[in-house]
Image (tube, coloured by chain):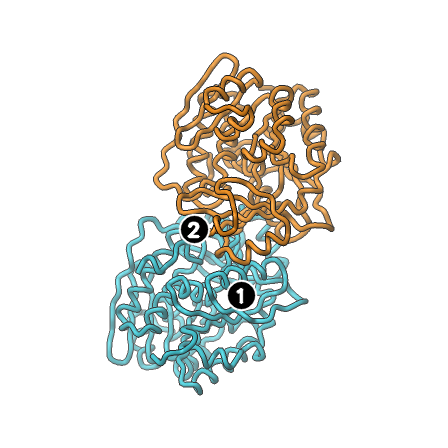
Chain colours: A orange, B cyan
Amino acid sequence: MVQTEIDVLGIGNAIVDVLSHAEDSFLDSHGLTKGAMALIDPDQVKTLYDTMGPGVEISGGSAANTIAGLASFGGRGAFIGKVRDDRLGEVFAHDIRSLGVRFDTRPTSDGASTARCLILVTPDAQRTLNTFLGACVELRSEDIDADLVEASAVTYLEGYLWDPPQAKNAFRKAVEIAHNAGRKVALTLSDSFCVGRYRDEFCALVAGGADIVFANETELLSLYRVDTFDEGLQAIRENCEVAALTRSEKGSVIVDHEEVHVIDAAPVEHVVDTTGAGDLFAAGFLYGYTRGDGLAECGRLGSLAAAEIISHFGARPDVALSTLV
Amino acid sequence: MVQTEIDVLGIGNAIVDVLSHAEDSFLDSHGLTKGAMALIDPDQVKTLYDTMGPGVEISGGSAANTIAGLASFGGRGAFIGKVRDDRLGEVFAHDIRSLGVRFDTRPTSDGASTARCLILVTPDAQRTLNTFLGACVELRSEDIDADLVEASAVTYLEGYLWDPPQAKNAFRKAVEIAHNAGRKVALTLSDSFCVGRYRDEFCALVAGGADIVFANETELLSLYRVDTFDEGLQAIRENCEVAALTRSEKGSVIVDHEEVHVIDAAPVEHVVDTTGAGDLFAAGFLYGYTRGDGLAECGRLGSLAAAEIISHFGARPDVALSTLV
């Protein structure tokens, strides 16, 4: 790749996670869909928080987790996302900056508080996300620093950005700047329900805007309304330069127009919490990609990072990922 | 023991911990004493926070950790401590109440924010505490609910309460109410430097106010200014009804006027973070004590809880301790 100042610029929702153990019956009694991300309003936050167990607060946000992971590998990351000037906003900013990530987005000084995601981890290590978007809804085109996008080899966008009403304009502006500067754009489909909400726009993005697409199996099937992984694989292959398709314990499949690489999942002694598995896969993959590794090696680095993140609570690495390479 | 509504009422500083990995060189460069608790002011919080690595926020506070552990065993706990009506105050209150603990202390609505403890965990799993007391300094005698103290079999006090200027009055009031009601008072010496700051008062408390005393080896040696564990043991034995003396991987020694029990540490596969080891030892011990177990069994329960807490980040149990018994 062309040498740039930043390897990957992530643009996404800036969220602090509140993680807690929960039984399946708790999800049922609150009508929550296991494994999915649901948007909740302040009243729902209060109801859910008041009844859930003790929590652990750890910075999160899908693209932010990916950039934190990239930095933990030793990559040069930047992030754009909106927090408020409150305590959780400080926590988010501290946690990502302390990894050496450039994060300059101006926080809001009024309106909703910094976003929180109440994450319920069931005994099977599956995570169910309940997101209060808070200050994230204030992300605007003006928050996209054109110089920063131009200085980044890859601009990485999360599909979740389609939920805050204004953010898609920021998203589209970033894509345009990146492509005009000859940079790559990567997109993660984020969540199968999110794909369901914005299928047509996501299809257009995959076909026209994104060079590299990350998707898990259910997102892929939802995007193309197909029944088998292989049908989805053939469809996405036609549409984008590189697709990195993750399949949980079955590993991942990385495809471009010429090659197909089937990568095993890295071994994990005990899966504790799957929060962030996809985000960290993308971190490892993009770390390899921006340093010029082949696709198979990119996939292997993704698997390594995903394995680390699911072995403990929370979606930020517990050890420097550079020590695992 | 006499049947009471509450097994253990804890009174202590209400703190949210911010835990982060750090190298020994980081402690050196900031002039921090490994393994100790240092009080820091808002400027020092800012300096330290700005330079430390990414954090994980988990409710803490020594006596609060003990009560959380007691509740996790299935004991009936209550807590008195001061937070502000801010986000971290909500986090603290949520986390302890969600375990079934009664926590009714009125939060402050102005002045300093909820207390934070910046905890640096070095590669040897040792923790170094840097506490900003914040709203804790507002704890007053008026916050002691006499009915609650009378309804509690044991009132458990942390030596750290000597640091906020007014809290010792609350502390003394609680001791008086408990003893007048025929209840037991337990005290933890908290920290060897804390013992150094208030040695005479602590000696008087151990001799006159506390029925059960928890101390680790360095706190014991500091209290009596002696050189050997055995000298300390003989001294404290004369002074209080029961002393539970913890010695890290060497286990613990429980003594009363008649008996001495030497309890092995429970096995731990990998020690990750020693934060809360003493707090959780006290949790297990008091859970056994208030259900009428013999001292050896109390010590065994303490070891079990301590082993659980040092096997992961943070000073609140990661599994229901009741499942370990």
Total marks shown come to 2
Q: Which residue appears farthest toward the top when viewing the image?
A: A258
Q: Circle 1: is it few (<14), some (14-19), or many (20+) Cα within 10 Å?
A: many
Visible residue check, residue B22: no
Marked residue chain, label 1 = B
Q: Which amino acid does label 1 sit on?
A: Ala
Residue at image mark 2: A23
Q: How far apart are marks 1 and 2 (CA)?
A: 28 Å
Residue drawn at (56%, 71%), measured in percent from left and top? B105
Q: Residue at coordinates 45% horizontally, 79% vertically from top-left?
A: B151
Return the x and y of residue B5 as percentages of the image width and height. Answer: 43, 76
Q: Mark 2 lies on which chain?
A: A
Q: Residue B14 carries which label?
A: 1
Q: Which x, y percent locates residue A99?
A: 55, 40
Q: Nearer the viewer, residue B229 or A230?
A: A230
Residue closer to the observer: A3 or B305? B305
Secondary element at tag 1: loop
Quarter of the image for residue B155 reads: bottom left
Residue A69, position in %: x, y?
A: 52, 36
Q: In which quarter of the image is the N terminus of chain B?
A: bottom left
